Image (tube, helix red, strand yellow):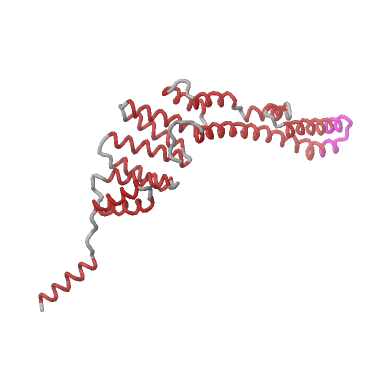
């Protein structure tokens, strides 16, 4: 009777607490799925591996594969913590540098290139390897490009390759950029002129015409002692077009800069032969 009770207890325990799967097989299967580009299945297996083998020496590689799989699927925010885990579980400076660079690339794609630059600065201070230093410098240039800092992007890219096509474009683009606030100030004294200079001819000439017309009408009313007419014309007509002119000058300046930066980014994405952060 006693042996039967013991047998039943062991049987219940086996069903209640099933044996943990083999961690090595989970890692192998996850790695195979990752290599076959079945990323979401790979993530599942590798997460199971991490759950059952938290202290494994393969933890760095598993976290790095999970993070990269998320990144290739476009889930950049989900990838970030796994890149950090890969960094923390690195067993050498080389593994740590790899995790940090990949994390920086993920931040570029996530739309936070400023964070990528901070990560790359930290990585640069921690590595003495010339090849990795050059790689870090390259990604600094790309992060600056995505931040809209064309001059800084050109500086980093030219360090690696003087006369680099992308660096030249960044230099030319920097020269074409305008100061939207300065254009707004100019339009305060010369309505429509900044818009015309930027090629927005219809907006520029209309601003020049309406501001001139209603400004003259307002001044003429005050000169003829028609105070009420002057106040009404000034408030409801002149200042309406004048304020619109100021806003347009600044807006068109911003749009002009955005077009230049986007054209360079488009060249980088579609025509440049350099490394890309895995779109």
Along the viewing direction, whichever of 189 and 27 lies nearer the viewer: 27
Magenta segment: 217-232
Percent position of residue 20, x then y:
23, 59
Q: Quadrant of the N terminus?
A: bottom left
Q: Is residue 226 magenta?
A: yes
**In which quadrant of the rendered view does residue 239 lie?**
top right
x and y percentages locating residue 83 in the rendered image: 35, 42
The image quarter in which residue 242 lies: top right
Q: Name, please, the residue furthest toward the front.
A: 36
The location of residue 54, given as percent across then percent down, is: 26, 50
- Horizontal side of 80 relative to 165 (left or right) equals left
Which residue is found at the position 80% from the left and 36% from the top?
A: 234
Number of numbered callouts drawn? 0
Residue at 81%, 34% (x, y): give it.
214
Furthest residue toward left: 2
Q: Is residue 51 magenta?
A: no
In the image, residue 158 above or below residue 200: above
């Amino acid at each position: 009777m006693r042996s039967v009770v013991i047998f039943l207890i062991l049987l219940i325990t086996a069903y209640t607490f099933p044996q943990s799967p083999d961690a090595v097989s989970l890692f192998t299967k996850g790695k195979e799925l990752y290599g076959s580009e079945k990323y979401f299945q790979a993530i599942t297996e590798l997460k199971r591996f991490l759950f059952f083998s938290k202290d494994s020496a393969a933890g760095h590689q598993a976290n790095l594969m999970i993070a990269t799989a998320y990144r290739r699927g476009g889930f950049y925010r989900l990838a970030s913590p796994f890149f950090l885990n890969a960094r923390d579980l690195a067993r050498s400076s080389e593994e740590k540098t790899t995790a940090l660079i990949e994390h920086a690339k993920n931040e570029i794609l996530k739309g936070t290139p400023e964070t990528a630059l901070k990560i790359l600065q930290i990585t640069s201070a921690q590595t003495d390897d010339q090849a990795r230093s050059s790689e870090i410098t390259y990604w600094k240039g790309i992060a600056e490009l995505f931040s809209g800092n064309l001059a800084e992007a050109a500086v980093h890219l030219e360090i690696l390759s003087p006369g680099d096509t992308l660096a030249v474009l960044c230099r030319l683009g920097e020269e074409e950029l305008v100061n939207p606030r300065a254009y707004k100030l100019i339009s305060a004294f010369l309505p429509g002129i900044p818009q015309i200079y930027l090629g927005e001819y219809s907006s520029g000439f209309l601003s020049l015409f309406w501001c001139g017309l209603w400004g003259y009408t307002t001044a003429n009313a005050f000169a003829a002692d028609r105070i009420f007419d002057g106040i009404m014309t000034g408030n409801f007509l002149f200042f309406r077009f004048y304020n619109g002119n100021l806003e347009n000058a600044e807006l068109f300046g911003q749009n002009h800069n955005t077009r230049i930066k986007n054209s360079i980014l488009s060249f980088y994405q579609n025509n440049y032969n350099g490394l890309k952060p895995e779109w």
